Image (tube, rainbow, N blue to C red):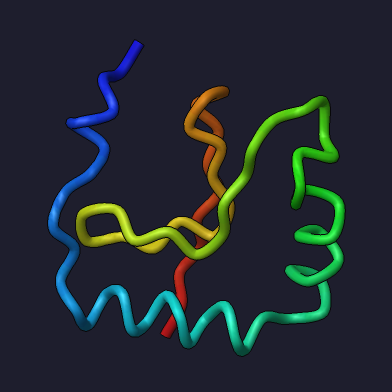
Amino acid sequence: MLRKTCMHRKVPDRHRHFARTMRADATMAENLLWQTLRNRQLEGFKFKRQVPLHTYILDFVCFDARISSASTHG
């Protein structure tokens, strides 16, 4: 199991800003999926969306189940 300390790293401000922008400009499909994933509605797993990780932005991620989805944006 990953220690929480290794998941929290300094994220460049431009990546954090880009992730916020992507959350605000989500597609209809992303919004529909998010409505299903949010608030532990899927088997009790906690999902997050538009999470900056190193040089990537993960569209949807569940750290406990080690599931992520990322696509190319730009």
| Residue 1: image location, x then y, percent | 35, 10
Q: Residue furthest top?
A: 1
Q: How many marks?
A: 0
| Residue 50: image location, x then y, percent | 50, 64
Q: Is residue 21 above or below residue 57?
A: below
The residue drawn where x is 23% and y is 44% is 8
The residue drawn where x is 73% and y is 81% is 27
| Residue 5: image location, x then y, percent | 19, 31
The residue drawn where x is 45% and y is 80% is 20
| Residue 40: image location, x then y, percent | 76, 39
**12 displayed left or right of 49:** left
The residue drawn where x is 42% and y is 85% is 74
Q: Is residue 26 above or below residue 1?
A: below
Quarter where residue 3 is shown = top left
**13 displayed left or right of 59:** left
Q: Is residue 21 above or below residue 60?
A: below
**44 displayed left or right of 21:** right
